[in-house]
Amino acid sequence: MKRVKSLVFNRFVLDENQHQSTDLLTMFSEASYSEENGMGFTRSRAEGSSVEATLLKRSFTAVQEFDPVNQELIKKQIPIFSAVSFSINSEMNLLTVYGGQSQLNLVRMMLRNIPGLKYSAEPISLHASTFAELLSEKGIQANIHQLTIRQFNYENGMVGRFSGEVTKQSTAQELLEHYGSAVVKVVFILKIEKEELLVQILPNGNLKVLCEEDDFDYYLAYLKQIIFS
């Protein structure tokens, strides 16, 4: 089954005194989830230069229940858990969070509170024109499928947000060159090993991928090599 998965990236550089994945794995293990804190890491593991983990957070919400004895509604607090998976690759200096900006912020907040972890992190801007150039350089067949432009201007008679499907690739290239940073979303169709892969690029470091769920890890590693290596 094909599914859409969202990702957001940050440049993530460990302090030179950190022992890369070994130190990270130890720190994540020491900050494992506990009921006392209501937040922490689970399923931490290292593979080569990459460390993967899931951040688990507990919060509470109020629901109403009926008390048959007193014949009235009462409020009850119940726990709600949210899980955010992420990985840190020390060779690529890359933090990958599975989700959007709110999930990234949650992971970064937790990382800031780990004793002894020293690093620098900054957002990564993904530009459609740069991505298109990388695909061309690597000989990957790709077409632009959709474009969204923030301040589209049609012959000075209409201005506003515009989104549409591309029927002519040369027109898409012209719009990319003309509007630059005003292009807020681009959807590419990539042909990789005779399979089609939909990749949506947003300028704030977010990326969405539509592919067979079983093939997602393979395509994610493939895209990372294209964009960040």
Image (cartoon, grey):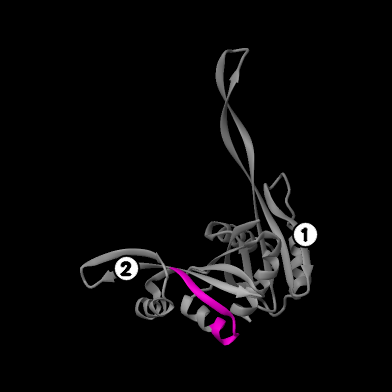
Q: Which corner quadrant of the image does residue 119 belong to?
A: bottom right
Relative height, residue 76 to residue 133 (above, below):
above
**Residue under the point 59% across and 68% down:** 197
Q: Which residues are magenta?
A: 134-146
Q: Amino acid at mark 1?
A: Ser
- Assign a secondary structure to mark 2: strand
Q: Is residue 132 visible?
A: yes
Residue 202 spot, x, y in % from top left: 48, 68
Quarter of the image with the N terminus in it: bottom right
Dot 2 corresponds to which residue? 151
Residue 201 appears left or right of 225: left
Of tags 2 and 1, the one toward the viewer is: 2
Residue 146 spot, x, y in % from top left: 45, 67
Whether residue 164 appears in magenta in the rendering, the answer is no
Dot 1 corresponds to which residue? 29
Q: Which corner quadrant of the image does residue 191 belong to?
A: bottom right
Q: Residue 193 got which mark?
A: none
Relative height, residue 184 to residue 132 (above, below):
above
- Assign a secondary structure to mark 1: helix
Q: Amino acid at mark 2?
A: Gln
**Residue under the point 39% across and 65% down:** 164
Residue 26 spot, x, y in % from top left: 78, 65
Q: Is residue 122 visible?
A: no
